[in-house]
Image (tube, rainbow, N blue to C red):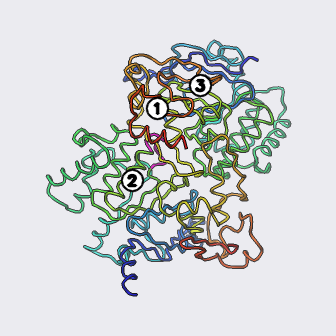
C-alpha cells in the first residue's frame, strides 16, 4: 500500500496548503492595521508534474496574488507552499536559490516586463548571470538555444537588439525564454497572452503547450478568460474574492459547472457565433472588496440560490462531489 | 432608403518622421438607419482611425488622401466647423476606449452630462437636462441618485455605463463604441452588451461597434466588417461572415478564437505578424501570411467584389462558400494547417 502513495507523492510538484494573504488597509494616516483585505483566503490545491492548472476569476479575485506567492514574490500571511516536497518558506541559502531556479514566472505585459535598456541577450542571460551558471560562451549558447526554442529565429539576428525593436508577440516569447533559461520545473504564467492580438496569441498558447510536452514543465496558468483556460489547462480552479469556489477537469467544469458563480461566469462569456443566444447570467449586484469579510459564504450577496441558512453558516469548504470535482457551496 | 453613413473609397494616411503610415486605405461601406455594424480587426489595423475619421477628430498629422465620408448624405470633410460641431453628439456620438479616463474627475458625473446637453441643445433648460440625465441613468442601469457622485466614486463598469449615458444624451442617430468593454470583467461586459443592444433597438439607433474580439462582435452586430492592415477585407451580414467566411484572414481569425461552446477544435495560427504600414506589402496586404497566396496575390490588389448578395470580399482566392479551405486542387494540396482547418470545419 505504501508504494502507490509514494509514487503519488513524488508525482505532485506543487502543493499549496491553507494559503492566505491579508493586506492591511489604511483608514487614514494613523490608523493602519485595523482592517484587512483578504486577497487570498485559505486556498489549497495541488499541481501534478506536467500538469497545467488554470486559475480563473475576475479582476481582484486574488489569482495574481496566489501566483506571486508561489513564485515567492509576495510573502504569504499564513499557509504553506510545498514544491517537490520542500516547504518554500523554510528554504535558505543554496536551497533557496535552487528553488528560484525551479520556479519561474511569466508576466502579463511584455511591454513592461522587459528592461528597455537591456539587449535581448542580456535579458535572457540575466538569470544565468545572477545564478552564476556557466561561462560566457556557455551562456551565449544557452541563450541562443532558448530563443530558437521559443521561435525567435534566427537567434543571432535578435541577440543584440532591444525590446523596442520587437513586436508584442516576440517580446512575450523573449519573456518566456527568460523564464525557461534556468530549466524550471514549474512556471507561474500570469495572463501571458491577454495583451497579445489573436493571430499572435494562438502561437504563444501553442508554444506554452508544446514546451510542456517537450520539457515536462508544469504551469499555474492565471487568466480571466475561460475559453483560453479550456484550451490550455488540464484542470481549472475558479476563484471568487480570495476563495477557490470550484475546481475540476477543464472540460467538466465548462460543460457541467456546479457552483452558481461558475455558472454565471460561463454564461457571461461571449461566443463567436451570431446564431447563439446565451442565457442571461443569474447573478446579482457587483463585485466588492473582501475587506474584513463576514464569515459566511463570500458569494452570498450575489448568489441567485442563496438561502437563509447560507447566511448563518461559515463559508463552505471545498467538497469532492465526484472524482476530482470540488465545489464550495452549501447547496451542492 | 439612403444610408445614414457612407464611406466611399476612404483613404487616410498619417505623416510621421519615418514616412507616411497608410492607416486606412480604400474603405467603402455603408450603414443603414438602425443597423449595427461590427468592425473587427487586430490592433493597428485602422479600426479606431476610421472612427476618428467619421468624427473628424483626426490629429494634425493625418491627411485624407482620397475618398469621402458622407453622414446623412453630406460630406463630413466639406462641412464647416459649426456644422461638424452640430453633427457631433446630436448626429454621431462616440464612446471611447478608455471610458475610465474620459470623465472629468473634478466634476460630478451628472453635471458633465448636463453640460453636454445644454451646450448642444441651447433650447433645453437645465432642469429638463437634469431630468433627462435621470432617465438616461435609468436606461443604462445606474441608480439615479448616483448622478451627484464624482467619477472616483464609481466602479469601472459604472463609469462605462455613465459614458454610454453621456453618448446617448443628445439622442444621436449613430453611436460609435470603440472597445467599450475591453477593460471590464466578463459579467459586467455581458450586462453592458445586453443593455446597449436593448437601448439601440428601443430608439432605433445605428451603431458602429469596434472590437478586436470576434466573440463580442458576433453578439452585437447585424453586419460585420473585417479589417486587416488598413484595408477592409470582408463585409457582410453577421451570419454570412461567421458561417461562411470567404477571406482567408477572416477564416483563420474565426478559428483562432477559442470558444467555451461545442467541441474543442484545433486553434488556427496565422504565421508571421501584421505588416508595417509605412511600407505595406504589394498586392494583397495579407499575402505574406496567407496559405492560399499565389503569384497573383503579390502582384495585384484584390478587387472588392460581391461574392454573395450583400457579402463582399477582397481576395484573389477566396475560401469556398461551403467553408472548404481547398478549391479543388487548383492550389495544390494545402499546408497541414489548411487541411486540419478544412476537416474540422466540415464536421
Inspect this view and state whether residue A37 appears: no
Q: What element carries label 3?
A: loop
Picture quadrant of residue B177: top right
The numbered disc on residue A208 is 2
- Span colored in magenta: A193-201
Say if the magenta span includes residue B183: no
Is B140 placed above or below B173 here? below
Picture quadrant of residue A276: top right
Q: Is mark 1 on a helix, strand or loop?
A: loop
User: For this view, does B107 lie left or right of residue A181?
Assistant: right
How many neighbours does mark 3 have within 10 angstroms: few (below 14), some (14-19), or many (20 or more)? Answer: few
Q: Which of marks 2 and 3 is in front?
A: 2
Callout 1 and callout 2 share a chain = no
**Position in image of residue B22 (x %, y %):** 46, 22
Is B329 placed above or below B152 here? above
Callout 3 and callout 1 share a chain = yes
**Chain for mark 2?**
A
Q: Quadrant of the N terminus of chain B?
A: top right
Say if the magenta span includes residue A194: yes
- Whole-angstrom CA distance, mark 1 to mark 2, is 30 Å
In the orientation shown, which residue stands out farthest toward the bottom? A1
Q: Which of A60 and A213 is in front in this view?
A: A213
Q: What element carries label 2?
A: helix
Q: Nearer the viewer, residue A248 or B109?
A: A248
**Position in image of residue A185 (x %, y %):** 33, 65
Q: Name the residue under label 1.
A: B326
Inspect this view and state whether residue A54 appears: yes
Of the image marks 3 and 1, the number of the one nearer the N terminus? 3
**Chain for mark 1?**
B
> Looking at the image, which residue is at 84% across and 26% down?
B123
Amino acid at each position: 500500500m505504501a508504494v502507490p502513495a509514494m509514487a503519488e507523492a513524488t508525482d505532485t510538484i506543487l502543493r499549496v496548503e491553507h494559503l492566505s494573504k491579508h493586506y492591511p488597509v489604511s483608514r487614514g494616516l494613523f490608523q493602519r492595521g485595523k482592517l484587512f483585505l483578504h486577497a487570498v483566503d485559505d486556498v489549497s490545491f495541488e499541481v501534478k508534474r506536467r500538469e497545467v492548472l488554470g486559475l480563473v476569476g475576475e479582476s481582484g479575485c486574488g489569482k495574481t496574488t496566489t501566483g506571486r506567492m508561489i513564485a515567492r514574490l509576495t510573502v504569504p500571511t499564513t499557509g504553506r507552499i510545498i514544491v517537490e516536497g520542500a516547504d518554500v518558506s523554510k528554504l535558505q541559502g543554496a536551497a533557496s536559490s535552487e528553488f528560484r531556479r525551479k520556479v519561474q514566472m511569466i508576466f502579463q505585459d511584455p511591454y513592461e516586463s522587459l528592461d528597455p535598456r537591456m539587449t535581448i541577450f542580456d535579458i535572457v542571460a540575466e538569470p544565468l548571470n545572477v545564478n552564476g551558471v556557466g561561462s560566457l560562451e556557455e551562456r551565449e549558447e544557452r541563450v541562443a538555444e532558448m530563443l530558437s526554442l521559443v521561435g525567435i529565429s534566427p537567434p543571432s539576428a535578435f541577440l543584440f537588439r532591444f525590446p523596442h525593436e520587437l513586436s508584442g508577440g516576440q517580446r512575450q516569447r523573449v519573456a518566456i525564454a527568460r523564464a525557461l533559461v534556468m530549466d524550471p520545473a514549474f512556471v507561474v504564467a500570469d495572463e501571458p497572452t491577454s495583451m497579445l492580438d489573436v493571430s499572435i496569441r494562438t502561437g504563444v498558447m501553442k508554444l506554452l503547450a508544446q514546451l510542456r510536452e517537450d520539457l515536462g514543465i508544469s504551469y499555474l496558468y492565471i487568466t480571466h478568460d475561460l475559453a483560453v483556460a479550456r484550451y490550455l489547462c488540464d484542470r481549472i480552479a475558479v476563484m471568487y474574492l480570495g476563495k477557490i469556489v470550484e475546481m475540476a477537469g477543464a472540460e467538466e467544469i465548462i460543460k457541467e459547472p456546479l457552483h452558481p458563480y461558475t455558472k454565471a461566469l460561463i454564461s457571461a462569456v461571449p461566443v463567436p457565433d451570431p446564431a447563439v443566444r446565451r442565457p442571461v447570467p443569474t447573478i446579482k449586484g457587483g463585485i466588492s472588496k473582501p475587506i474584513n469579510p463576514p464569515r459566511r459564504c463570500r458569494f452570498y450577496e450575489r448568489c441567485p440560490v442563496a438561502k437563509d441558512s447560507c447566511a448563518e453558516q461559515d463559508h463552505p469548504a471545498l467538497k469532492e462531489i465526484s472524482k476530482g470535482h470540488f465545489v464550495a457551496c452549501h447547496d451542492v | 432608403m439612403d444610408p445614414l453613413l457612407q464611406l466611399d473609397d476612404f483613404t487616410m494616411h498619417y505623416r510621421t518622421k519615418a514616412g507616411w503610415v497608410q492607416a486606412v486605405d480604400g474603405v467603402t461601406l455603408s450603414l443603414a438607419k438602425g443597423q449595427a455594424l461590427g468592425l473587427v480587426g487586430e490592433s493597428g489595423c485602422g479600426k479606431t482611425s476610421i472612427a476618428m475619421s467619421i468624427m473628424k477628430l483626426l490629429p494634425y498629422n493625418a491627411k485624407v488622401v482620397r475618398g469621402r465620408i458622407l453622414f446623412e448624405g453630406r460630406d463630413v470633410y466639406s462641412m464647416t466647423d459649426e456644422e461638424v460641431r452640430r453633427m457631433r453628439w446630436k448626429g454621431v456620438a462616440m464612446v471611447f476606449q478608455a471610458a475610465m479616463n474620459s470623465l472629468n474627475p473634478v466634476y460630478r458625473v451628472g453635471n458633465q452630462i448636463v453640460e453636454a446637453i445644454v451646450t448642444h441643445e441651447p433650447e433645453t433648460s437645465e432642469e429638463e437636462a437634469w431630468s433627462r440625465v435621470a432617465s438616461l441613468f435609468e436606461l443604462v442601469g445606474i441608480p439615479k441618485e448616483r448622478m451627484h457622485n464624482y467619477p472616483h466614486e464609481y466602479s469601472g463598469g459604472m463609469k462605462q455605463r455613465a459614458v454610454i449615458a453621456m453618448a446617448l444624451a443628445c439622442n444621436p442617430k449613430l453611436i460609435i463604441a470603440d472597445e467599450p468593454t475591453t477593460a471590464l470583467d466578463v459579467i459586467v461586459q455581458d450586462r453592458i452588451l445586453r443593455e446597449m443592444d436593448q437601448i439601440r433597438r428601443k430608439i432605433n439607433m445605428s451603431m458602429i461597434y469596434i472590437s478586436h474580439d470576434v466573440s463580442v462582435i458576433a453578439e452585437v452586430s447585424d453586419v460585420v466588417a473585417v479589417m486587416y492592415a488598413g484595408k477592409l477585407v470582408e463585409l457582410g451580414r453577421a451570419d454570412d461572415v461567421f458561417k461562411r467566411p470567404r477571406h482567408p484572414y477572416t477564416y483563420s481569425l474565426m478559428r483562432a478564437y477559442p470558444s467555451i461552446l461545442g467541441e474543442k477544435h484545433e486553434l488556427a495560427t496565422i504565421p508571421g505578424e501584421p505588416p508595417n504600414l509605412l511600407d505595406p506589402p504589394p498586392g494583397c496586404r495579407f499575402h505574406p501570411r496567407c496559405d492560399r497566396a499565389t503569384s497573383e496575390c503579390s502582384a495585384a490588389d484584390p478587387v472588392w467584389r460581391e461574392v454573395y448578395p450583400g457579402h463582399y470580399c477582397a481576395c484573389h482566392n477566396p475560401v469556398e462558400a461551403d467553408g472548404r479551405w481547398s478549391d479543388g486542387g487548383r492550389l495544390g494540396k494545402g499546408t497541414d494547417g489548411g487541411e486540419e482547418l478544412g476537416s474540422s470545419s466540415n464536421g
